[in-house]
Structure formats: C-alpha cells, structure tokens
Image: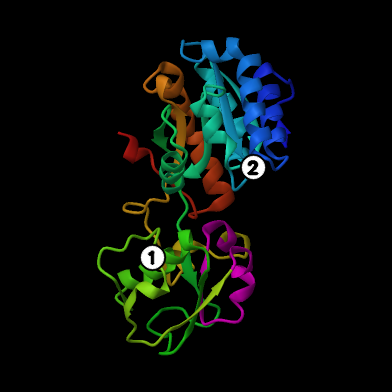
C-alpha cells in the first residue's frame, strides 16, 4: 500500500480498516469498521463542516494513484490539503466514504458505483463529478480494417460479463452483428446475438490473457491501457473504438452526500479538471484517455 509521508489519523484508520477487511472474515471486517468509526469520531464529525483538508481514497489500479502529486499541487493553489491513501481494494473505498471516514474516493466507473451502491444499500454516498473515460477497442495484428476481416474470423473478447458486452456492442454499432432488443452493455453476452451474418467465432478469455490472445485470433478486444503499453495508438490503430457518450464506464469521483456542492468538493473537481492533469494524461497515455469535464457542466 502506498501512503502519504505523514500518517494522519485518517490514514491510520483506513489502514486499520483495510487490513482487517483483508483477513477474509466479514464479521471481523465489520467489527473493524465499527471500531474505526469510534476511534475517529472527531474526524467523522468534522467531515460535514467545511475545512481545508480533503480526505481522499484512491485506487492503485490504472492511473489513479499516478496523479496524486498533481492533485496536491493544484489543490494547494486554492488553499486545500489533500490527505490521501492509495489502496488495492475495490470494496472498502465506497463504504468508507459512505460512513464518513473519508470525504471522497476515485477508483471506479459509474456502472460499478451504481451496482455496488444498490447491492450494499448505501445511502450516504453520491457521484460528485465525472473524470475520465478510457475507450476499449478491437485490434488486429493481421488486418487494418473490418472490411478486410474475412467471414468466420475468430474474435477474442473478455469472458467476464461486465466487459463481454463491450466487444459485442462495438460490433453491433458497426453493423456487423445484431443483438437482442433492449439488452444493455453491462449484461450483454454471446447468447444475446440474434444475427451473425459474418459467422464470426468468439474466443472468450480472462482479462489478463487478452494481450497474449491477440496473437492467436484475427481480432481481439483490448483495454486502453493495455493497447498503449504494447504500442498501439487507440484512435489511429483500433478497428473499432468505444465512445464514452452513452456508455456507463465513465470514471467518477464519489463523495459523502453531505459534501455535495461544498467548496472543498468544487476545489477537488477543479483540480481533476486542471490543465496539469490533462498534460499528464496526454504525455503518458496519448489519446487513450478522454477527459469528461463537459459532462459536469
């Protein structure tokens, strides 16, 4: 786990909670959460009043943790301190914010957030603003366009349900196959194909195998980060590429609902939308990351 140099009470509480949650027993994790709430009652009580410290939880996945130093500098310009912790857990961050142990988090896309909040019955956490969208695409080492892809081609797609539909929707939007009416991208799967005129064959593989599978298929699905890492420029090289406008995979910052619209959250949004953040994305990831500030207006 990565953390700030000084271990504030906020960070110590989160570390304690996450370590307990990692022990594998839900009863132990719940006990840890209750103890943490009691030990940091002062911090929790102050979370609803405006101050100059933003307690923020970030994921170590993707580029979330990479931008923290930039966020700190941008927030400092407006007189705010970013007190943060970077974790490798996707369960605790929403619960921590919901319970008032942290002000905000950034690690998830909107589809995951909506489903998690519903499943867990969380009442005190809200989406504050959108951040980025990283378009996945269909790539090929053999062909430059779907016009060149022959009938019967093998297409590699993710096996997990949340991403399986992303590949199918790209093919559908190109008019290369048809899907059952009304199916949404989060739940779409091969069984929802109603017409496959090109007789494509699909090879479903684990996310971690998508890059390696590209050598064995005619066309393969890649996440943006993976595509960039192996030398592709998504907007130039993808045979098909997602657009973020109508997809639920838009990155968000979630906050404790009591903080919606407060100056500290507005300052955090301003930092995320800063030119310094955009420059970092452009320099390291090229056109693989789309910023979504237009959706926040």
Seen at 46% across and 86% down, the residue is 153
Separation of residues labelled 2 and 1 (CA atoms): 28 Å
Give x and y (percent) for residue 68. 60, 33
**Residue under numbered circle 2:** 60
- Residue 254 on image: x %, y %: 46, 33
Going by the image, does 198 lie left or right of 159? left
Q: Quadrant where the N terminus lies?
A: top right
Write the start and end of the magenta stretch as one range: 206-227
Label 2: element kind: loop
- Residue at 44% x, 23% y: name it: 265
Front residue (pair 199, 35): 35
Q: Nearer the viewer, mark 2 or mark 1?
A: 1
**Residue placed at 73% from the left, 20% from the top?**
6
Image height check: is 206 above or below 59? below
- Relative to residue 152, is residue 104 depicted above or below? above
Q: Nearer the viewer, residue 139 or 98?
A: 98
Residue 188 circle label: 1
User: Is 213 in the magenta?
Assistant: yes
Residue that extends furthest to the left in the rendered view of this protein: 181
Q: Is residue 277 magenta?
A: no
């Amino acid at each position: 786990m990565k953390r700030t140099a000084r271990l504030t009470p906020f960070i110590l509480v989160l570390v304690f909670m996450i370590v307990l949650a990692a022990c594998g027993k839900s009863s132990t994790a719940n006990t840890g959460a209750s103890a943490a709430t009691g030990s940091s009652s002062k911090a929790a009580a102050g979370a609803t009043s405006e101050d100059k410290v933003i307690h923020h939880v970030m994921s170590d996945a993707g580029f979330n943790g990479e931008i923290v130093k930039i966020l700190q500098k941008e927030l400092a310009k407006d007189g705010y301190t970013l007190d943060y912790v970077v974790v490798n857990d996707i369960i605790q961050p929403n619960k921590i914010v919901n319970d008032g142990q942290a002000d905000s988090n950034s690690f998830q896309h909107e589809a995951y957030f909506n489903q998690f909040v519903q499943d867990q019955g969380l009442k005190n956490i809200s989406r504050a603003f959108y951040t980025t969208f990283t378009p996945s695409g269909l790539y090929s080492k053999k062909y430059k366009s779907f016009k060149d892809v022959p009938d019967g081609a093998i297409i590699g797609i993710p096996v997990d349900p949340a991403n399986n539909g992303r590949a199918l929707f790209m093919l559908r939007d190109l008019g290369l196959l048809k899907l059952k009416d009304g199916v949404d991208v989060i739940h779409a799967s091969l069984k929802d194909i109603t017409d496959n005129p090109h007789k494509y064959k699909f090879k479903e593989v684990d996310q971690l195998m998508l890059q390696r599978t590209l050598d064995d298929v005619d066309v393969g699905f890649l996440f943006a980060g993976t595509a960039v890492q192996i030398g592709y420029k998504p907007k130039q090289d993808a045979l098909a590429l997602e657009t973020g406008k109508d997809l639920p995979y838009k990155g968000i910052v979630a906050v404790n609902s009591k903080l919606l619209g407060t100056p500290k959250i507005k300052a955090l949004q301003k930092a995320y939308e800063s030119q310094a953040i955009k420059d970092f994305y452009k320099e390291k990831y090229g056109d693989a990351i789309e910023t979504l500030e237009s959706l926040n207006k």
